[in-house]
Amino acid sequence: MHSRDTQHRGALVAIEESIRETLAAQDQHMAAWDLLWKERVANSFAGVDEDETEPALFVQYGPEQPEVVQV
């Protein structure tokens, strides 16, 4: 019975860690979109054409942490 409880706790810890990693990746992804939105609003008020200044943003998911890359 003790072994089963230990396995169950281990599984729950793994699930919790996976959820934390997913939420962290989502936070970073949303931060990139927030930055892009703020730039668009600022450019709109400045009268700058979006096509001239809009960078391409990509979120690369790797085994470590997602990385926002601006091209």
Image (spheres, grey):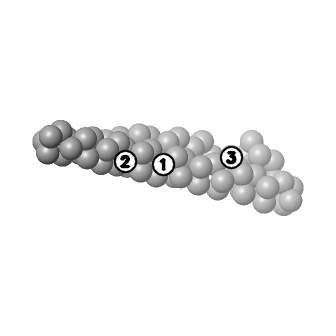
Q: Name the residue under label 3.
A: 54
Q: Position of residue 49 (x, y in %)?
A: 81, 47
Lateral position of residue 13 relative to residue 68, left or right: left
- Picture coordinates of residue 51, whole percent (x, y): 74, 42
Secondary element type, mark 3: loop
Task: State which mark lies toward you, 2 or 1.
Answer: 2
Residue count near mark 2 (Cα–Cα under 10 Å), binned few <14, some 14–19, many ≥20: few
The mark closer to the camera, 3 or 2, is 2
Q: How crowded is mark 1: few (under 14 residues within 10 Å), some or many (20 or more)?
A: few
At x 31% / y 44%, what residue is drawn? 12
- Which disc is residue 7 wearing? none
Say which mark, if any, is on residue 16: 2
Residue at mark 3 to residue at mark 1: CA–CA distance: 27 Å
* Amino acid residing under circle 3: Glu
Which mark sits nearer the N-terminus, 2 or 1? 2
Q: Name the residue under label 1.
A: 23
Between 54 and 24, the one lying in front of the other is 24
Quarter of the image with the N terminus is top left
